[in-house]
Amino acid sequence: MAEAAILGFLQNNESIPDSGKFAAELNLDHEEIKNVIKSLQGFRYIEAKELKRETLVLTDEGKKYAAEGSPEFHFFSAVPEEGSISKDDLEKKLEASVFKIGSTQAAKKKWVAMGKQVSRKVQHVEDKVKESLLQIQQGLELDQESLNSLKARKLIVTQGWTGYSDVKKGPCYAPKRKIFATDLTRENLQNWKELEFKEYNFNAKGQPLDAGHLHPLLKVRKQFKDIFCQMGFEEMPTNNFVESSFWNFDALFQPQQHPARDSHDTFFLKAPSTTRELPEDYVERVKQVHESGGYGSRGYNYDWKREEANKNLLRTHTTAVSSRMLYALAKGPFTPKKYFSIDRVFRNEAVDRTHLAEFHQIEGLICDRGLTLGDLIGVLQAFFSRLGMPKLRFKPAYNPYTEPSMEIFSYHEGLEKWVEIGNSGMFRPEMLQPMGLPEDVRVIAWGLSLERPTMILYGIDNIRDLFGHKVDLDLIKRNPICRVGIE
Ligand code: PHE
């Protein structure tokens, strides 16, 4: 509407002298007219000069008097034509503000004689205030004296106004805006002769690309992976969440009545509930070592049940994968190995600020002849220092499959305490010997969650802010590619 009006008007007229008047005459919104002028000017359809001036507008009080009359007029009208009225009666008759302002103004204008009794001094008055205000409302000129007095009484104020003057045809004027083709589509290329293409703006900045974002866990996983690779570790295949109890527990010399095997700690599978295949001769040696020991051990002295070993579960640790890998390694001539894995494990636990029913486990192991606990401590220290966590403490612990065992603690600045970040140890002979590894081969190993170091590195103190359905997706976008701690 506004655009057609402006371009149409200029077709037959030299110029638009005042955008404000133009809008008022055509009953169009001046803001819209201004926007259109700006845009048409940008495309050089028209030229225009900016126009600034001050206008007078009525305050709320001014609007009231313009509509209802001034207080002094009401005051005067309330005084009888003949005789007088007591001030008290007058006060009762009038609104408080009308009485107050009206009495002062009427006295000042010498319309009334004020005392205990009030009487008229003139017969007839004109409400000039109301008239002046109405004139301003209509945009009419007013003498300076009246303006000053209305301003002094705060009935009017000046307001800045912007518009355009001298709006006329520009070098690219057309009665109607041309629509340029902006895209090189198949249709546009076919009709290129009929179309006019928009010129390229080689100075325009491109849209910023919305690149993908990595979840903090993936970033820290990458850091761990890099560190393992730098330290010469190979990755183990962890692509099976479902595992048999045999590889998850029995191969690790974890007795069948061990509380961790209980359904309170482990998610067992309903279907398929059991494994189909296990290496029979090895199963036999594992049974033997559980029941009566061997390799210098007394075993656990209980009836080992195959049905228990067959039960399928969601792996509770990636050490299940380590046991498969060591078994495979034992089959060939012995070569030292450094293995690692980072993947999901599942535990039937009560969830709280630091625990979920599933998490990512990082697992590392080194297997070579003659390794000691000192090697383990040294490797862990080197490993965590590379991550920016050199503050470590170790605590003696127990695992059915390691002896000795150590829990690993790191200091959490946010929680202001030492938090357990991992578990470690040397695999027992009862685990390694039945696999067929040479007697002097030692395996040092450790496992930790990916979540806890991530929380430490990112200053997150509730695991539910990091993983699961309550995670704020902005967290992922906000955090830069992680470099924390890596030197
Ligand atoms: N499997 C252990 C755990 O779940 C971690 C671990 C791995 C401990 C290797 C010792 C050796 O906590």
Image (tube, rainbow, N blue to C red):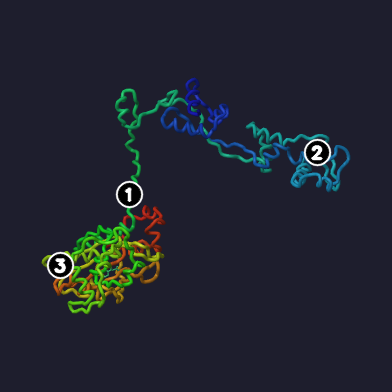
> What percent of the width, then of the height, locates residue 391?
31, 71
Residue extending farthest right: 83
Badge 2 crowding class, 10 Å Cα cut-off, few under 14, some 14 to 19, many 20 or more, is few
Q: Quick check: marks 1 and 3 in contact, CB under 8 Å?
A: no
Q: Earlier in the sequence, mark 2 or mark 3?
A: 2
> What percent of the width, then of the height, locates residue 199?
34, 31
Q: Which mark is on residue 220?
A: none
Q: Which mark is on residue 77?
A: 2
- Which mark is in front, 1 or 3? 3
Q: Which mark is on residue 330?
A: 3
Residue at coordinates 73% horizontally, 39% vertically from top-left?
Answer: 70
> Would you say the beta carbon of the disc 1 residue lies within 8 angstroms of ligand 1?
no
> Would you say the beta carbon of the disc 3 residue lies within 8 angstroms of ligand 1?
no
Badge 1 crowding class, 10 Å Cα cut-off, few under 14, some 14 to 19, many 20 or more, is few
Q: Which mark is on residue 212?
A: 1
Regarding residue 384, the answer to whether it shows in the image is no
**Residue 162 appears left or right of 457:** right
Regarding residue 78, the answer to whether it shows in the image is yes
Give whichever of 146, 41 is nearer the camera: 41
Q: Quadrant of ligand 1?
A: bottom left
- The amino acid type, in three-letter code, at marker 1 is Gly
Give whichever of 207, 294 is nearer the camera: 294
- The amino acid type, in three-letter code, at marker 2 is Ser
Residue extending farthest top: 12
- Which mark is in front, 2 or 3? 3
- The amino acid type, in three-letter code, at marker 3 is Ala
* Residue 482 picture quarter: bottom left
